[in-house]
Amino acid sequence: MTDIAKRRALAICVILAAALLLRVINLDADPSPLINRDFITDEGWWAHNARNAFFYGQWRIDEYNQGLYSAYLYTALLYFTFKLFGITLMTLRALSSLGGWLTVVLLFLLVRRDISTRAALLASVLLGFSNLHIIYSRTGFVESTMVFFMALALWLWSMRSEHYLFASLSGIAFALTLLTKITAIYFLPGLALVTLAVSIRRSVRRRDAVLFLTGGCVVGAVYAIFFVVPNLDDWLRLNMSLGSGAEWPTGFSGRIQSVLKLLGSTFYAQAPLLTALSLVSLCLLVVNAARDGAIKAIRNAGELEITSAMLLIGYLLSLSFTVYQPERRFLPILFLMVILSAAVLEKGWALFQQLANPHYQMSAIGWFAVLFVLPALGILELRWRALGPDLSLRIWLPKLILIGGLIAVAVAFSRGLGGKRFRRNMLATSGLIFILLFSVLSLGLVYKTLSLWGLDRDVWKPGAFVDHKLLLMCATAILICIVAIISVAVRARRISLPLLLGSFLFIEGIQISTWLLQPTYTLKEANQSLASMLTRDDTIVTYYETPLLSSAAKVICRSVRRGFNTDVFEKSDPEYILILRMDNWKDYALEDMPPEEWPPPARFVPARIAGFDLCPSRLRGPRFIVELYSLSPR
């Protein structure tokens, strides 16, 4: 083994060890304030059926069976985890934590095989130390496990040349992705695009394709025959209920709003560097297609790169047709963006240097992608309430005119119009916009993160702590210097890899420090208190099962809006009701509570017996307050 190989082996060992540590340390601590608030409901919901099986020996004890019908494999794996290690917040999250870490391992193996060892190390760093991926690997959401099976399918597919059985195993892994969570169907348009790309590349043997389909179909058939068909009515009812109104938009205006929501998602601000590098990668693909034709560009691209791009585009297309776009839905996108980012860091973007040449020719699509994608997205996201509703003609007509002007300039460039100096200035302006946009997003993310350390606008007032001021000034100065150096590097037409990685680790490290260095355990303490307070014979009605995870009491999730367990008060005579008085730092008086949560039916007299402040932050206090009420018949 050469010295370089030894150093790289040591590097990947350190990276994987650190990535594992970040995903398991203090695993039962409160989730990061940077994560979406849905863990207060969803951790309990997705564990509901596994918890029922653990405590009562029955998967179904009520009408709400989201885990069983929408995440069958995840629920089964979670049940076996509970049987082996007991039921706690730590064991609940261990499955996601392990899945998240194994995804980093598979990513390294996949990228090393298809691109290079150097790119694999870069990819491992980008995903292993991504705060967004870490915090979702540390909570009981299903997406971390789902992405693991997707990564497994890609890795097994890349191994098909070693033995034909790997193609079949890849199909099985892809089917298991669907069984892990039903929303993996959003990969299907991307899979169709991948099929189109590989047919153009002629890189897949018919036998491998048949084996892939066979493996997937076998798993799907077994699941359908032995589970879906015997439970067809309940399976359809739950999944249709969860999707109706919340998942799919209604009407043309709803579809437009869904697309705009996707384009303006806060996810991109949570991963600014990866978003920027992925845009560069996709832009390079478009430029190659605009210059040489789509077929030649697809054939010249790396297999993993084109596969990731097609899956990413297809998944985004699917999301654009959904109303509900929570941050965790973007976890597969994050994984695919890491692959594209590692590829572009490995290969560079030297192609952009040729665009300033007045003799360089490509179609208008290429010029529009290079010069005007970000301005066009900004125009589409503009809102001006004074002119009327967001979808009114008075709003959209100026937008369409502006975008039409940008298209006209791109067409002119494709026909050789516009002088050399004008083209160079346009390219420089486009690069400046690109750098400024993602620099501002990075600065905003750093400022948001520093507020979790107790820093806010009052830090500049007389009497504020000097160390807080110095910390804020130093952090801002460091990031500004990094951005400035990156700008110089880009203008000098070279990639400064250490600087890019340094800025990435700086931004992610600040975010990680907010939950790593100041953990709280209020959710764990609430679980322990409620578990000691309630017995197996008690029945609790609630919308928030996560604080009750460790309790042996029977938990009934009631939702009038979705039509689940609406008659629980008549059928079960519950002894308790658990409500959320403060939700995501917003306090509610009892009279302002949602009708489906409060008050209980008039024949019950509620009496508050316990309350818990959960997930506090330095500046804003508790993020949630749950209250337990006993119910006595009048």
Image (cartoon, rainbow, N blue to C red):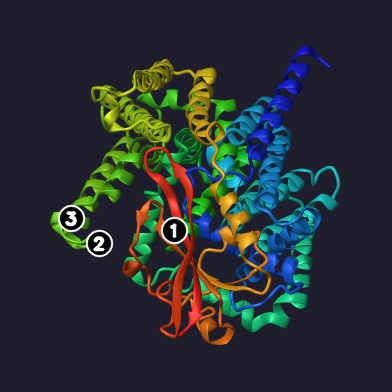
**Cα separation between marks 3 and 1:** 24 Å
Say whether disc 2 or disc 3 marks the residue closer to the N-terminus. Answer: 3
> Which numbered marker is on residue 385?
3
**Cα separation between marks 2 and 3:** 11 Å
Say whether disc 1 or disc 2 marks the residue closer to the N-terminus. Answer: 1
Judge whether 322 appears above or below 228 on screen. above
Judge whether 211 appears above or below 280 on screen. below
Q: Nearer the viewer, mark 2 or mark 3?
A: 3
The answer to whether 633 appears left or right of 444 in the picture is right
Mark 3 residue element: helix
Residue 404: percent from the left, percent from the top? Answer: 25, 48
Residue at image position (26%, 26%) is 422
Say whether disc 3 or disc 1 marks the residue closer to the N-terminus. Answer: 1
Residue 205: percent from the left, percent from the top? Answer: 77, 52
> Which numbered marker is on residue 391?
2
Q: Amino acid at mark 2?
A: Leu
The N terminus is located in which quarter? top right
The C terminus is located in which quarter? bottom left
Residue wearing tag 1 = 320
